[in-house]
Structure formats: structure tokens, C-alpha cells
């Protein structure tokens, strides 16, 4: 998994590895599971080393309750993040692969693209989780880990470009445009999902407000 963080290894994977969608999801799930475990440990550390406000809350409703609620919320949001991560990666990478084959004569397989991207995405997920727990243990390095995370994000884009270029055997321009297509597709997908969520939650809130108003008027 971590080998995929090096461009030369990606080029080798593109030649030798016969990745599948299922294998890519398994790799991503494994990375998610490791990240979740690290996140839970970080949360428990944060609670035990918390400031006065959190300590007061813990004393009021019990440390165990705070810990359990925090872990449950973390797991639920993490599961949502897992589903979103796999779905969004699949859709946006498909757009990038389609762009490479339709406009630049690429001959690669989408399954291979998805698999390799899942490899380095999973590695980045674990590294990010480790940074999170380091921020809890040593708050003074939060700025450093933040900068490294930003650089890691830019490096991930470069790895995506290398992956598309290596798998579909396209030239520089084809690789760049296809990578940008992935980014644009991701932005559009995020906007669509955001609008849908706002619409659904907005209707729910209006319905709740109407019901509250009706009960208040009785």
C-alpha cells in the first residue's frame, strides 16, 4: 500500500498488477479500518487529556458516557466517509478514465486505475490518521502536520497524474487534462450532494418547525 506513494512503483504496478474493483475496495476498507482504530485511540486520548470544559462535562454525565458517545459518533461519521470515499472515487476516476480513452486515445483499464488509486489513497488515509493522534499527543506540532498534510494532498494529485498517464499510456497533455477532469468531476459531485443534503435537511427542518409551531399554538 505504502509503496504506491512512490511514482516509480506506480509505473511498475501499472505494468504488472492486475487490479480489480473488488481488490481496490478491500484495500481502501483495510486502510479505513486502521484509520478508524487510530481515530478512536486519538479520541479517547483527547477526552482523558481534555481541558476544564470537557472535564466538567465528563464529571456531569460520566466519562464513560462521553467516551461512548464520542466513539459512536466517530464510527457513524467514519462509515459515512467510507461509503462517500469509495463512491466518489469510483465516479470521478471513471470520468478521468473516460476522458483519457475518449479524447487522448488511452488504452488502459479502469479497474487498474481504481485499484492503484485505492492503494495510495489508503496509505494517505492512514498517515492522516496518525497525524491526527500526534496532534493530540503533541499539540505544538499541529502546524507542522498541517503543512505536511497539505503537501501530501498535492503529492496525491501528482500520483493520480502518474497513474493515469502510466495506465492509459497517454502523453503529458492527456494525463494533465484527465487528472483535471477527475478534480472537476469531484467538485461537481460534491456540489450536487451538498445541494441534495441541504434540500433534504431544509425540508426536514421546515417540517419540524411547522410541527413545533402547530403544537405551540394548541
Image (cartoon, helix red, strand yellow):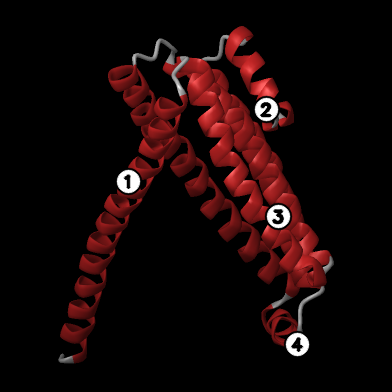
**Which residue sits furthest bottom?**
217
**Residue linked to disc 2:** 4
- Between 54 and 186, the residue placed more toward the observer is 186
Query: Label 2 vs label 1: CA separation?
Result: 26 Å
Query: Label 1 vs label 4: CA separation?
Result: 41 Å
In the image, which is nearer the foreground, mark 2 or mark 1? 2
Residue beneath the point at 32% across and 46% down: 189
Which of marks 4 and 3 precedes in the sequence? Answer: 4
In the image, which is nearer the foreground, mark 3 or mark 4? 3
- Between 126 and 67, the residue placed more toward the observer is 126
Check if mark 2's residue and mark 1's residue have beta carbons within 8 Å: no
**Residue linked to disc 4:** 52
How would you rate the neighbour count of disc 3 (Cα within 10 Å): few for under 14, some for 14-19, many for 20 or more? some
In the image, which is nearer the foreground, mark 2 or mark 4? 2
Residue beneath the point at 24% across and 68% down: 202
Q: Secondary structure at mark 3?
A: helix
**Quadrant position of residue 51:** bottom right
Query: Label 1 vs label 3: CA separation?
Result: 27 Å
Query: x%, y% of residue 175?
Result: 45, 28
Q: Quadrant of the N terminus?
A: top right
**Quadrant position of residue 181:** top left
Query: x%, y% of residue 62?
Result: 72, 76
Which of marks 4 and 1 precedes in the sequence? Answer: 4
Query: Label 3 vs label 4: CA separation?
Result: 30 Å
**Residue linked to disc 1:** 189
Query: Label 2 vs label 3: CA separation?
Result: 18 Å
Query: x%, y% of residue 99?
Result: 32, 26
Query: x%, y% of residue 197?
Result: 30, 58
Q: Secondary structure at mark 4?
A: helix
**Residue linked to disc 3:** 148
Residue beneath the point at 63% across and 7% down: 16
Amino acid at each position: 500500500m505504502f509503496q504506491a506513494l512512490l511514482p516509480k512503483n506506480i509505473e511498475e504496478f501499472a505494468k504488472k498488477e492486475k487490479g480489480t474493483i473488488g481488490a481496490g475496495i478491500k484495500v481502501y476498507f483495510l486502510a479505513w479500518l486502521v484509520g478508524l482504530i487510530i481515530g478512536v485511540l486519538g479520541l479517547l486520548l483527547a477526552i482523558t487529556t481534555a481541558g476544564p470544559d470537557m472535564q466538567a462535562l465528563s464529571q456531569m454525565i460520566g466519562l464513560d458516557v462521553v467516551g461512548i458517545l464520542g466513539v459512536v459518533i466517530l464510527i457513524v461519521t467514519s462509515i459515512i466517509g467510507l461509503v462517500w470515499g469509495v463512491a466518489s472515487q469510483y465516479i470521478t476516476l471513471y470520468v478521468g478514465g473516460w476522458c483519457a480513452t475518449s479524447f487522448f486515445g488511452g488504452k488502459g483499464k479502469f479497474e487498474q486505475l481504481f485499484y492503484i488509486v485505492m492503494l495510495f489513497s489508503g496509505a494517505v488515509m492512514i498517515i492522516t490518521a496518525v497525524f491526527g493522534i500526534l496532534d493530540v499527543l503533541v499539540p505544538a506540532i499541529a502546524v507542522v502536520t498541517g503543512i505536511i498534510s497539505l503537501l501530501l494532498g498535492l503529492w496525491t494529485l501528482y500520483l493520480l497524474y502518474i497513474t493515469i498517464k502510466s495506465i492509459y499510456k497517454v502523453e503529458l497533455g492527456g494525463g494533465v487534462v484527465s487528472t483535471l477532469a477527475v478534480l472537476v468531476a469531484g467538485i461537481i459531485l460534491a456540489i450536487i450532494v451538498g445541494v441534495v443534503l441541504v434540500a433534504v435537511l431544509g425540508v426536514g427542518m421546515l417540517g419540524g418547525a411547522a410541527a413545533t409551531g402547530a403544537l405551540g399554538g394548541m
